[in-house]
Amino acid sequence: MTRDRIPLVLLAIFLVVALAGLWTPPWALFILTIAFAKGLVALGLMLFLRAGLVSFGQALYYCAGAYAAGALGRYLGVSDIFLMMAAGAAVAGLLGFILGFLLAKYRGIFFGLLSLALSMILYGLLVKNEALGSTDGFNIRPSTLFGVRPDLEWLRYLVALSAAAVALGAAALVHRYLGTPLGRLAPAIKDNEIRVEYMGASARHAIHVKYVIAAVLAGIGGALAATTVGHIDPDMAYWTTSGEFIFMAILAGTGSVVAPFAGALIFAVIHTTAYDLSPNTWQMFLGTSLLLLIVFLPEGLWSLFRRRRAG
């Protein structure tokens, strides 16, 4: 049996962030934190891709987690980053559990379009809701850690460190889940769902569990992004936001729980660089990158590591 190196890799990434972050400029720490937040959403999408499904509506839970965190600060005065992420996870998880009973019945394009429709329903409700700022959204209270608000020069570093701890901890739990019998059902569901049912396993139950896990991850990511940016608005539930998450998941591949975070970071670098070089046509750079990836690396960037090990 080969040794499982993923926990050590996750620990090494955290130590690198903790040490290198002390000398990293604030703007780079901001990009890294957002990459961790969006990587959590892509991690949930990885579970779907392994089962042969694509969700076009993960922005629903990303936005729900962000608004849950924002409401916690706006109406209850809570600004602790960990409590905000817990609130985002709880609200998104509950919403995913309820809607999962419906989504687990569908496959293929119907699964993707129904998830997209639900996300756009939330977008429409938020746009019409003046109490939550309508199209402008509202600002988030500055983050605190365990009730203490650090100095401004340390705040960005501590937020990035907290993001790394939560994101990599979630990745470790997902990696553990993928090793369970329920987690190992995903490739079988993708290949032949009927045979899975004949074996006595419930494909619908397995997909429902994956849907809830993905919703919780997206809720944490949304809350983390909200506290990092300091502002939320309905665009977090728009279909283009879901498209970005799918781009990250495809860019990274499904070979490891580390891949979604690498994909999110690479996406952030491409997006930032393209926007800096050509503000009016930056989408063209993203489209070209995706096209090259599909042609030359259809299994994502992580397949390069798998090919190297095979060689």
Image (spheres, rainbow, N blue to C red):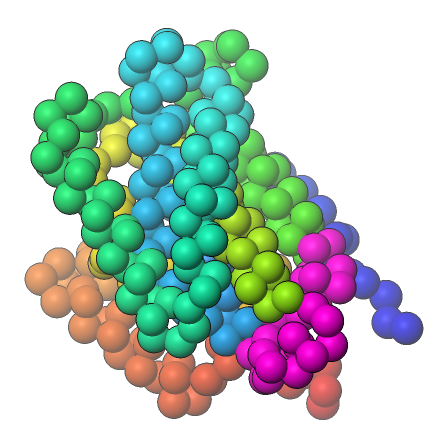
Q: Residue at x 52, y 49 (%)?
A: 212
Of 253 and 132, nearer the camera is: 132
Q: Residue furthest right?
A: 1
Left or right relative to 187: residue 137: left
Q: Main secondary structure of the magenta part?
A: helix
How far across and down, in percent of the image, does residue 295 sit? 38, 89
Instruction: Give the x, y percent position of residue 54.
Output: 41, 69
Q: Which residues are magenta?
A: 176-201
Please say if 190 is above or below 239: below
Residue placed most toward the observer, 257 or 108:
108
Q: Quadrant of residue 221?
A: top left
On the image, the x and y values in percent for residue 270 come to 32, 63
Up/down of 179 relative to 13, above or below: below
Q: Is residue 96 magenta?
A: no
Q: Does residue 172 sit above or below 157 in this rendering?
A: below
Residue occupying image coordinates x 15% and y 21%: 131
Residue occupying the point 18% across, 73% down: 284
Q: Is residue 296 visible?
A: yes
